[in-house]
């Protein structure tokens, strides 16, 4: 058994998950810093896809924030040029929708490129059968620890 395999065999599942999470968060933090986004703004940006129009309430829900906190995050994304207002509700002018600007679309492309780079590194170095079993196991663990 190679030394690296033995080293990881002595660690518990939760410890390995935390290490993986830490590594992923470091990549995420790097891209956030590159784009000059707060963690909430980053989540907000990821809650909308190119070509999609969403209400502030929808985005707030996807970010897991209250409507008022979500609105402040959305306002910052608008101020930074990542989002723009889209046509809202004609009957209720208080409701407004947003969509990605070209800058926002480019930021999403950059985020996706970093994620794809990580995925390619995994796929290149882990045999397909091991990866399939690992993915199934991760899904099972996620179901077990996710509150009902």
Image (tube, helix red, strand yellow):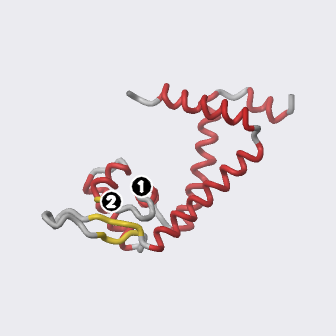
Using the image as rendered, state which of residue 23 and residue 140 is in the foreground: 140
Q: Residue at x 24, y 65 (%)?
A: 96
From the top left corner, tell me how far across and down residue 125 is, in percent: 77, 44
Secondary element at tag 2: strand
Task: Name the image quarter holding residue 99.
Answer: bottom left
> Mark 1 = which residue?
47
Q: Residue at x 26, y 54 (%)?
A: 67
From the top left corner, tell me how far across and down residue 134 is, in percent: 65, 32
Task: Name the image quarter holding residue 116.
Answer: bottom right
Are there few (<14), some (14-19), or many (20+) residues within 10 Å of tag 2? many
Are there few (<14), some (14-19), or many (20+) residues within 10 Å of tag 1? some
Q: How many marks?
A: 2
Is 129 placed left or right of 138 in the picture? Answer: right
Secondary element at tag 1: loop
Give the spatial CA distance, label 1 vs label 2.
Answer: 9 Å
Q: Residue at x 80, y 29 (%)?
A: 6
Depicted 110 relative to depicted 138: above or below? below
> Mark 2 = which residue?
54
Quadrant occupied by the N terminus: top right
Q: Earlier in the sequence, mark 1 or mark 2?
A: 1
Quadrant occupied by the C terminus: top left
Closest to the camera, between mark 1 and mark 2, is 2
Is 6 placed left or right of 64 in the picture? Answer: right
Q: Are marks 1 and 2 in contact (CB under 8 Å)?
A: yes
Depicted 118 relative to depicted 8: above or below? below
From the top left corner, tell me how far across and down residue 101 is, in percent: 42, 72
Using the image as rendered, state which of residue 107 and residue 36 is in the foreground: 107
Is 39 placed left or right of 54 in the picture? Answer: right
On residue 14, which mark appears?
none
Is 48 placed left or right of 130 in the picture? Answer: left
From the top left corner, tell me how far across and down residue 13 is, in percent: 63, 28
Task: Name the image quarter holding residue 78.
Answer: bottom left
């Amino acid at each position: 058994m190679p030394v690296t395999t033995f080293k990881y065999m002595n660690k518990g599942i939760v410890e390995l998950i935390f290490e993986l999470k830490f590594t992923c968060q470091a990549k995420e933090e790097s891209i956030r810093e590159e784009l000059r986004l707060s963690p909430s703004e980053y989540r907000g940006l990821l809650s909308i896809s190119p070509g999609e129009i969403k209400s502030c309430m929808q985005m707030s829900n996807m970010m897991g924030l209250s409507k008022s906190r979500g609105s402040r995050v959305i306002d910052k994304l608008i101020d930074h040029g990542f989002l723009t207002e889209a046509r809202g509700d004609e009957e209720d002018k208080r409701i407004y929708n947003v969509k990605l600007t070209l800058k926002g679309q480019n930021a999403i492309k950059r985020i996706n490129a970093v994620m794809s780079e990580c995925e390619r590194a995994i796929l290149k170095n882990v045999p397909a059968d091991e990866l399939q079993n690992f993915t199934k196991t991760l899904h099972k663990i996620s179901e077990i620890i996710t509150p009902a």
